[in-house]
Amino acid sequence: RFYNGENTKQNFEKAYESFKKAAELGDPASQRYLGLLLFHGKGCLKNRNDAGAWLRSAASKGDLEAKRILSTFSHLFDN
C-alpha cells in the first residue's frame, strides 16, 4: 500500500521496510518489489547487485514478472 499510495500517502521508505521483512520471509512478490526499489533507489540506496539478487530469488520461486524483468534487463544486473 505504501508503494502505490493506496489508502495512504505514497512512502517508498515504508514500502522498502515492509517489502524487506516479507522478502526475508520468502515472499516472491515482496522480493520482486524489493528488487525494484533497490534498482531505482526508491526508499533506500540504489544497489543493482542486491536488486538482481532479490529478483533472481523471486524468479526462482516462480514469480513470472521477476523472470520477465530479469530476461528483459539482464544486462543491467551483475551476476
Image: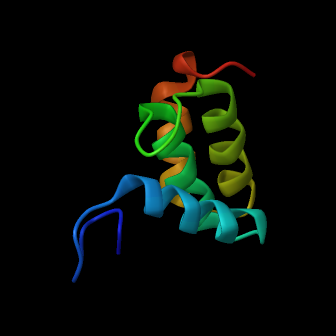
13 lies left or right of 52: left
Q: Residue at x 41, y 33 (%)?
A: 40
The colour scheme is rainbow
- Report the number of numbered marks: 0
Q: Quadrant of the N terminus?
A: bottom left
Q: Residue at x 51, y 40 (%)?
A: 44
Q: Is residue 75 above or below residue 48?
A: above
Q: Position of residue 14 (x, y in %)?
A: 45, 63
Q: Residue at x 53, y 38 (%)?
A: 38
Q: Is residue 60 above or below residue 29?
A: above
Please identify the quarter of the rendering in which residue 15 is found: bottom left
Which is nearer the eye, 18 or 59? 18
Q: Residue at x 55, y 68 (%)?
A: 18
57 lies left or right of 66: right
Which is nearer the eye, 65 or 28? 28
Q: Position of residue 22 (x, y in %)?
A: 66, 71
Q: Is residue 16 above or below residue 30?
A: above
18 lies left or right of 52: left
Q: Position of residue 43 (x, y in %)?
A: 44, 46
